[in-house]
Amino acid sequence: MTPNLRKLLFETLYKNRYLYRFASTVPFAGQWRTWQKLVLSRIHGRDILELGCGLGDLLADLLEAGYMCRAVEHSPEMVAAARATLQRRHAGPASWVIQGSAQHLPFSANSFDTVVSTFPSEYIYDPDTIAEVERVLRPGGRLIIIEGAHLQPVGYLQPLLLLIHLLVYGPRSLSGTRHGPKQSGTTTTIMDDEAFTTEELPGMPFGGLIPLEQSGLRRRSQRVHSRRWQVFITLGEKPDTTDNDH
């Protein structure tokens, strides 16, 4: 699929919450929400900002877990859908979802402990976005980006779905699948009755286009995988300036 056709497809999805729900569920064998929830164990602090909240499912998860959250979403259709999700789940007021731009965040400096972005579009590669994230993060704060994920070719259905991903996203849908340098640490966790492993992988190619260092954020790369899928996570950590005062 050509880049222009892919862009048209995504723009169509962003304008229809029902198509968006279908596209984020069926082609990914129902794993999209599992991948989103990988954010929960990586949250730092209590005040959270989500960039590009889509249908608002993760935002509602965070609010129900007791975090103080706000969300900025560019698409007016997705803003309406996210607000409806908060109301349906009684998770928080609709006003906590703000229509706006990641490059011009409507918050003061040092407002949040963590900024979250799951499966973001091109805005995450814009230096202005990362500069804004750094500005609103408190010292010691963290940016969590779930940049990509893909199914493993297991069973009967997933190889077919994986082929569809290749047709839509191209070879980049499998980026990072080769093992990089030896991991510096691994942990195994159980979530939704499925075991998965998290590896710290310095120097992995995924996330390389996100200009974290340009805004002074320290980079970490993680690969999370189970028998059925792989997820690629990039973390940007803001130095805690208070450590330099002692």
Image: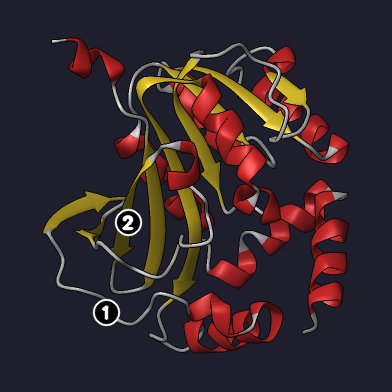
**Display coloring:** secondary structure
Q: Quadrant of residue 3?
A: bottom right
Q: Earlier in the sequence, mark 2 or mark 1?
A: 1
Q: SS at mark 2?
A: strand
Q: Nearer the viewer, residue 49 or 29?
A: 49
151 to the left or right of 240: right
Observer-nearest of 219 and 151: 219
| Vertical placement of residue 203 versus 169, above or below | above
Pointer 2: what residue? 221
Q: How many marks?
A: 2
Residue at left 50%, top 29%?
134
Residue under the image location 32 percent in, 37 percent down = 42
Residue 90 place in picture, x, y as percent: 61, 17
Residue 174 lies, in percent from the top left, at: 48, 79
Mark 2 belongs to which amino acid? Ser
Label 2 and label 1: CA atoms lie apart by 13 Å
Say whether residue 85 is visible: no
In the picture, measured across the screen, residue 86 lies left or right of residue 5, that is left
Q: Is residue 245 above or below residue 77?
A: above
Q: Is residue 177 above or below residue 80?
A: below
Q: Quadrant of residue 203?
A: bottom left
The residue under the point 37% across, 69% down is 230
In the picture of the structure, the residue carrying the numbered disc 1 is: 179
Q: Amino acid at mark 1?
A: His
Would residue 17 be found to the left or right of residue 22 on screen?
Answer: right
**Quadrant where the C terminus lies?**
top left
**Where is the N terminus found, in terms of image quarters?**
bottom right
Q: Residues within 10 Å of mark 2 (few under 14, many from 20)?
A: many
Helix, strand, or loop for circle 1? loop
91 or 10, which lies in front?
Answer: 10
| Residue 56 rendering spot, x and y as whole percentages | 64, 35
